[in-house]
């Protein structure tokens, strides 16, 4: 849901948002893509004082998942989150 919030708040000129949920053998993936104004991920700093992208990454990684962010100024944004379908093994 955070991805949709980010589209509404930051994508500006977005007219389309696509959502794909994929189930694979050992993971589930959620991809959210928009055709909004995009941004330079290397230069991205949360301007509104929030932690949106940072918090998203922390939440996904806390569940042993991965988060990928692809964006280009004027070319929209894609956010892909992958999570394992089984709980990670606890090591002692």
Image (cartoon, rainbow, N blue to C red):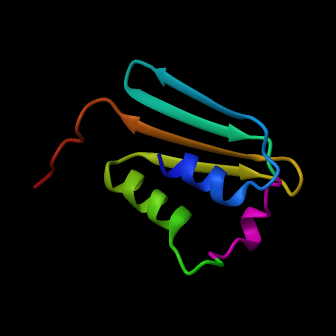
Compared across the picture, whether 86 is left or right of 21 comes to left
Choose between 78 and 24: the one closer to the eye: 78
Whether residue 38 is in magenta: the answer is yes
Residue 8 x, y percent position in the rendering: 64, 52
Residue 66 x, y percent position in the rendering: 48, 47
Task: Name the residue rendered at 79%, 64% in the picture.
Answer: 40
Task: Name the residue rendered at 71%, 49% in the picture.
Answer: 70
Of all residues shown, which one is farthest toward the right?
Answer: 74
Compared across the picture, whether 74 is left or right of 5 comes to right
Choose between 79 and 90: the one closer to the eye: 79
Q: Main secondary structure of the magenta part?
A: loop
Bounds of the magenta span? 37-46
Task: Name the residue rendered at 33%, 56% in the picture.
Answer: 62
Choose between 16 and 60: the one closer to the eye: 16
Compared across the picture, whether 21 is left or right of 37 comes to left
Task: Name the residue rendered at 73%, 41% in the picture.
Answer: 34
């Amino acid at each position: 849901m955070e991805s949709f919030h980010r589209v509404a708040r930051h994508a500006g000129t977005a007219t389309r948002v696509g959502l794909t949920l994929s189930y694979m053998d050992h993971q589930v993936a959620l991809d959210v893509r928009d055709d909004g104004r995009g941004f330079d991920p290397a230069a991205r700093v949360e301007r509104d004082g929030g932690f949106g992208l940072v918090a998203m990454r922390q939440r996904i990684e806390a569940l042993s998942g991965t988060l990928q962010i692809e964006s280009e100024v004027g070319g929209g944004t894609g956010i892909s989150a992958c999570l394992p379908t089984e709980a990670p093994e606890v090591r002692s």
